[in-house]
Amino acid sequence: VARGLTRFVARKNSIAALKEALEEVEGGSGQVVGIVGEAGVGKSRLLHEFKNQLPKNKYAYLDGRCLSFGSSISYLPFLDILRCYFEIKEGDREFIIKEKMAEKLTELDEKLEYTLSPFRDLLSLKVENEDFIKLGPQQKRERTFEAIRDLFIRVSQEKLLILAVEDMHW
């Protein structure tokens, strides 16, 4: 849960500013960091360099992106984040994706099995759970938000969680 709000403008010492925010997180104070700047100043590069400097086993770094033509695609950055978390590759067949999701969730916490139906629905995979299928749009949306929230909370209990969403202005 974010307990602090920190905003940084892209500049030469931005990597130091990100590391400073990370130290706050390591100390138990959640952070929200905004990186702002003109197109082409290196915001994506900054995130790439920051990610590459993180020790692999200490952090969970999940990223998503908003697109100019993606405003009609519900949950677009979360689709990327889920694909990242479940290690879904372009061209993976549906049964492989379902297998990866089930294994990863079971490995994290068997209690998260209920998130499979909302995640499958979100990723446009076949949902077998009749109870979920019968839900109305508002109830499905609520279950989806709960599933995403619960996944993030559970992941953050294992490792420090870094969520990066690029191009939020879209």
Image (cartoon, grey):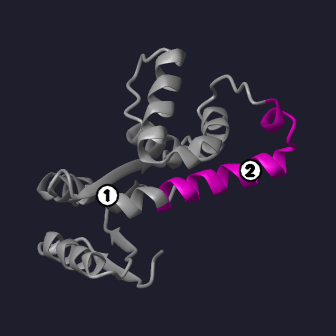
Please report the bounds of the magenta region as a residue range: 130-153
Residue at 87% across, 35% down: 134
Q: Does the segment drawn in magenta span residue 56?
A: no
Q: In the drawing, what numbered circle is on residue 146?
A: none
Q: Mark 1 points at which residue?
A: 39
Q: Quadrant of residue 136?
A: top right
Q: In this view, does 157 lie to the left or right of 138?
A: left
Q: Does the segment drawn in magenta span residue 144?
A: yes
Residue at 41% across, 29% down: 88
Q: In which quarter of the image is residue 50?
A: bottom left
Mark 2 is surrounded, within 10 Å at the Cα level, by few (under 14), some (14 to 19) or many (20 or more) other residues, namely some
Callout 2: SS: helix
Residue 112: where, in percent of width, then height? Answer: 57, 47
| Circle nearer the viewer, 2 or 1 | 2
Observer-nearest residue: 104 or 48?
Answer: 104
Residue 7: where, in percent of width, then height? Answer: 35, 80
Residue 118: where, in percent of width, then height? Answer: 66, 41
Residue sitting farthest toward the front: 110
Q: Is residue 135 left or right of residue 100?
A: right
